[in-house]
Amino acid sequence: MRQLISKKIIIYLCLLFLLATVNNNSIKNLRFPQIEKIEISGYSLDQSSQVKDIIEGLKSKNIFFINQFELKKNFFSNNVIEELSIFKNYPSTLIVDIKETQFLAVTKKDGEDYFIGKNGKLIKKNQSITQLPYVFGDLNINEFLEFKKNIDNSNFEFTQILNLYYYKSKRWDIETSKGYLIKLPRENIGEFLNLFIRLSKEKNFNDKRMIDFRQKGQIILDAK
């Protein structure tokens, strides 16, 4: 009886060893799919060596273990990018769709010109876009975005703006492409811009170049 039990134990141990050996070899030979193709849409890699380096670093990596959160964080370190989606097309293709931010204006910081992006970031100016207004002053980008929102909600066209002047009091002046200087109060910006539109259609307004809305209950007009 003891011999029979001993033989069974030996058989079990041999089967266990064989099973473990087969599993180890399978694990060693198991290969996860690597990224062989990366498709980029909405963005040219020639525009940024930074984005190009990120893409190059993805090649031959395991597609299963790509951390999308960390990858998006790397992409968004490029201030031009506003939106990003990443799709894993198994077994070996990574699809990256990039949306660039819209340039709204130009401003100066530390002696250099920067685009102000719709995404609330400053992008170093490396191309010429003549239609954009120039913003003077120690700019707060959130204040600018809120200001533009007020303009967009009015009848005044943002494209009419030649220069913007931002003051520490959080007040704005607008210089238009037609030579008008509009001095705005801190509040009710949209209402005063609509009023400017109505006044500009009056016949006796033709020789006026400075419109001052800063004083409550008063409108100061000047030929400038």
Image (tube, rainbow, N blue to C red):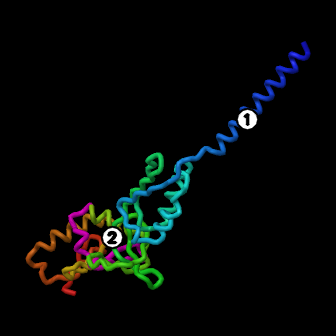
| Label 2 to label 1: alpha-carbon separation | 64 Å
* Picture coordinates of residue 56, whole percent (x, y): 50, 64
Amino acid on which the number 2 mark rests in the picture: Leu
Taking the magenta stretch, the answer to whether it contains residue 173 is yes
- Give the residue at mark 2: 104
Residue 121 seen: yes
Q: Inspect the image, locate mark 1, and give the three-letter code of the amino acid beneath it.
A: Ala
Disc number for residue 128: none
Horizontally, residue 71 falls left or right of residue 216, namely right
Residue 3 on image: x %, y %: 90, 17
Residue at 30%, 79% in the rendered image: 163
Assign a secondary structure to mark 1. Answer: helix
Q: Say left or right for 192 vs 4.
A: left
Q: Sequence-wise, which precedes: disc 2 or disc 1?
A: 1
Quadrant hosting residue 207: bottom left
Where is 21 relative to 178, above or below?
above
In the foreground, 200 or 12: 12
Q: How crowded is mark 1: few (under 14 residues within 10 Å), some or many (20 or more)?
A: few
Q: In which quarter of the image is the C terminus?
A: bottom left
**In front: label 2 or label 1:** 1
Start and end of the magenta stretch? 153-174
Badge 2 density bin: few <14, some 14–19, many ≥20, Cα 10 Å: many
Q: Residue at x 12, y 80 (%)?
A: 206
Q: Does residue 142 show up? A: no
On residue 20, which mark appears? 1
Q: Which residue is drawn at 82% across and 20% down?
A: 8
Residue 194 among magenta residues: no
| Corner quadrant of residue 20 | top right
- Quadrant containing the N terminus is top right
Q: Is mark 2 on a helix, strand or loop?
A: strand
